[in-house]
């Protein structure tokens, strides 16, 4: 036998086989299959990875068997055949053992994954909780529908304003007493949270020019202490109609028609002279109580009338400041509170309920 610098090849092959058997020991029980419940899916996946490592260690290119193969050519001719057979047999045994366990694990993992992803179609469904609109939104949409049918556009504008839009452009200069009654919240940069939707009149005229017919529902803010009839944030709808030959008669007709559609065909509207800086003349409007038809009840505080909003003919200087020719055009405007209408219609004795997000209250408006 030729001199072998690495020792007896037969012994080396046997040693390699032994080392394999030792490493393979914990996999051996899985040769004929992985029984259900003996391992978890995660454990089986881990075993599969470890088996891959074991394969490259004992049957890969750098394994002891691979290097034993290389020296076969160097042993004496008469021993070569027998040794070659031994190497091949050993290698075949190793590969077969690994292959069997690999197959068992694969089968088990596939079945476990399918089981995990299976859907039980007989399981009862989970009920979807259906939401609904907030009472303010319901009211706003009713108002919008009425005005859209009268040919008005809906304007949605910013809630943060400069003093110019909130006051100056509406004919309320610095020091005017109307600024105090509408004290609002200011940002650090001196911008104001709008205290009325009348600001949108100016934006709409600047953007659309004249003629223009629009309503602007939206949020407004005032520095009020909350009580049953006040909240520092509430909702208004502004209306504006500017065209050639618009008169107070158009204002009265429009507001009366709106209130009839809102509260019933028999509703009567009344206008009382009033003052607003941005209208001249100005009027507040009331409508006959929808509950008692004017006879007097708790809702109208026995007066038969319910006060709703302000209105008037747009002041010429407001038109001019917004870029509309006051010689050619005239217009009317009005504004009213949505929260107040909501409270009236649903008989709420505290408007703060609208903003507390208490589902026991809100779910009554489904
Ligand atoms: N902006 C007024 C307020 O907040 C309401 C109002 C009055 C709006 C007269 C108007 C108007 O457009 O013409 O109380």
Image: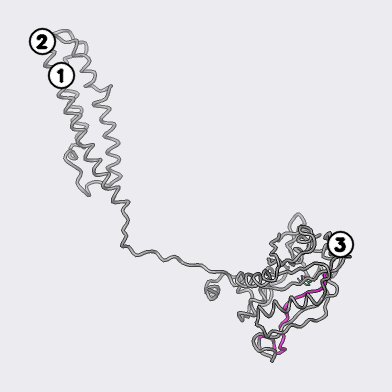
The residue pinned by badge 3 equals 325
Labels 2, 1: front one: 2
Residue drawn at the location 16% of the way across and 24% of the way down: 90
For the residues labelled 2 and 1, say whether their Cβ atoms are less than 8 Å apart: no
Instruction: Pick the residue in front: 248 or 316.
Output: 248
Q: Which quarter of the rendered image does ligand 1 occupy?
A: bottom right
Disc 1: CA contacts within 10 A as few (<14), some (14-19) or many (>=20): few
In reply to whether residue 301 is colored magenta, the answer given is yes
In reply to whether residue 93 is colored magenta, the answer given is no
C-alpha gap between disc 2 and disc 1: 17 Å
For the residues labelled 3 and 2, say whether their Cβ atoms are less than 8 Å apart: no
Q: Earlier in the sequence, mark 2 or mark 1?
A: 1
Residue drawn at the location 11% of the way across and 16% of the way down: 82
Residue 212 falls in image quadrant: bottom right
The boundaries of the magenta stretch are: 299-314
C-alpha gap between disc 3 and disc 1: 111 Å
Q: Give the label on residue 11, or none.
A: 1
With respect to residue 124, does 343 lie above or below? below
Name the spot of residue 89 as percent of width and height, x first: 14, 24
Q: Give the label on residue 78, or none.
A: 2
Question: Left or right: where does residue 342 sit relative to residue 170?
Answer: left
Q: Earlier in the sequence, mark 3 or mark 2?
A: 2
- Label 3, secondary structure: give it: loop
- Label 1, secondary structure: give it: helix
């Amino acid at each position: 036998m030729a001199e072998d610098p690495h020792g007896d090849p037969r012994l080396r092959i046997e040693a390699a086989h032994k080392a394999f058997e030792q490493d393979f020991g914990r996999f051996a029980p899985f040769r004929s299959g992985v029984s259900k419940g003996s391992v978890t899916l995660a454990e089986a996946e881990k075993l599969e990875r470890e088996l891959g490592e074991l394969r490259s260690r004992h049957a890969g290119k750098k394994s002891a068997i691979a290097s034993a193969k290389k020296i076969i050519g160097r042993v004496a001719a008469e021993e070569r055949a027998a040794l070659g057979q031994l190497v091949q047999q050993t290698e075949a045994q190793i590969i077969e053992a690994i292959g069997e366990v690999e197959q068992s694990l694969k089968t088990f993992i596939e079945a476990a994954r399918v089981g995990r992803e299976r859907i039980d179609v007989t399981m009862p469904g989970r009920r979807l909780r259906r939401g609904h609109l907030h009472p303010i939104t319901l009211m706003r949409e009713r108002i919008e529908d009425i005005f859209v049918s009268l040919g008005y556009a809906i304007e949605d504008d910013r809630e943060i304003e400069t003093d110019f839009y909130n006051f100056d452009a509406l004919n309320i200069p610095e020091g005017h007493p109307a600024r105090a009654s509408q004290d609002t919240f200011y940002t650090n940069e001196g911008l104001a949270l709008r205290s009325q939707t009348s600001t949108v009149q100016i934006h709409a005229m600047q953007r659309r020019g004249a003629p223009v017919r629009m309503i602007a529902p939206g949020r407004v803010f005032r520095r009020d202490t909350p009580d049953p009839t006040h909240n520092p944030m509430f909702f208004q709808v502004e209306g504006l109609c500017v065209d050639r030959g618009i008169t107070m008669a158009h204002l009265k007709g429009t507001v009366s028609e709106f209130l009839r559609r809102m509260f019933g065909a028999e509703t009567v509207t009344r206008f009382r002279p009033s003052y607003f800086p941005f209208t001249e003349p100005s009027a507040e409007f009331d409508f006959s109580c929808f509950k008692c038809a004017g006879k007097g009840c708790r809702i109208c505080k026995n007066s038969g009338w319910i006060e709703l909003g302000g209105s008037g003919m747009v002041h010429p200087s407001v038109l001019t400041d917004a870029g509309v020719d006051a010689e050619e055009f005239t217009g009317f405007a009005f504004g009213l509170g949505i929260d107040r209408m909501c409270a009236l219609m649903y008989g709420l004795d505290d408007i703060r309920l609208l903003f507390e997000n208490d589902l026991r209250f809100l779910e009554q408006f489904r």
